[in-house]
Image (spheres, rainbow, N blue to C red):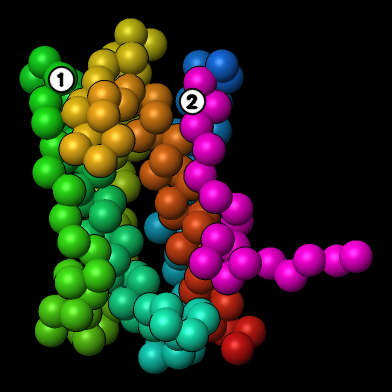
Amino acid sequence: MMTSMDPRFPTGKFAFDQAAAADKRRDCIAAISSFPGELKAAMAGARLDKTYRDGGWTARQVVHHIADSHMNAFIRFRLALTEDKPTIKPYNESEWAKLADMQLDPRLSIQILDGLHQRWHAMLLAMKPADFTREAIHPDHGPRSLDWFLQLYAWHGRHHIGHIRLTAAA
C-alpha cells in the first residue's frame, strides 16, 4: 500500500545523525553553498501566491522565511564560534510571516541569500573539526553543537525547496 507524501515534510523530518556528523560535514557544507542556485531553479516554476498545502505559507512567504531563518542561523554560528555556549534567541516564525515585508518581491530575499550563503560557506570551510563541536543553547532544544545546526540548516533548505516545488505542482 502506497502512502502519500506529507506536504509539511516533503523531504522527511529532520533527524540529526550524531554518529556520522564528521562524515556528513562535507555534504552539508556543499548544501549550504549550492542552496541559492537550487532555490532559484525551484522558483522558476513556483506559483508565488499559492500555498504548498492548506494552511501553509505561499511560495513568496517561504522564500522570505528562508532568508529570515538563514540570517538567524548565520548569526547563531558566529555566536557559537566566538562565545562560550551562548543562549540563542528563537523567533516567532508564524508572526514574522504576517509582517508586511513578506509581500515584497521574493528576489529581494534571494539576493540576501546569495551573499549570506557565500559568507556562511567561507566561514564553514575555515572551521576546524573541533569548531563543529562548539555549542549554543537553544531555549527549545537545549545545548546543540554546530554539527547539529549544520545538518539542520542543510535539511532546512531542501525542506523548503520541496515546499516551493509543491506550489508549482498545485
Under circle 2, the secondary element is helix
Residue 118 percent location from the top left of the image: 30, 44
The picture places residue 83, in percent across and down from the top left corner, at: 9, 20
User: Which residue does the image show at 32% across and 61% down from the upper left?
Assistant: 66
- The residue segment tinted magenta is 1-18
Report which quarter residue 73 is drawn in.
top left
- Where on the picture, by quarter, is residue 119? top left
Q: Is residue 146 visible?
A: yes
- For the residue labelled by badge 1, is the local secondary structure a helix, a strand or a loop? loop
**Between discs 1 and 2, the one toward the N terminus:** 2
Residue in front for this viewpoint, 11 or 105: 11
Classify mark 1: residues with Cα within 10 Å, few (<14), some (14-19) or many (20+).
some
Q: Is residue 33 above or below residue 150?
A: below
The residue located at (16%, 55%) in the rendering is 91
The residue carrying mark 2 is 25
Magenta span includes 7: yes
Nearer the observer: mark 1 or 2; the answer is 1
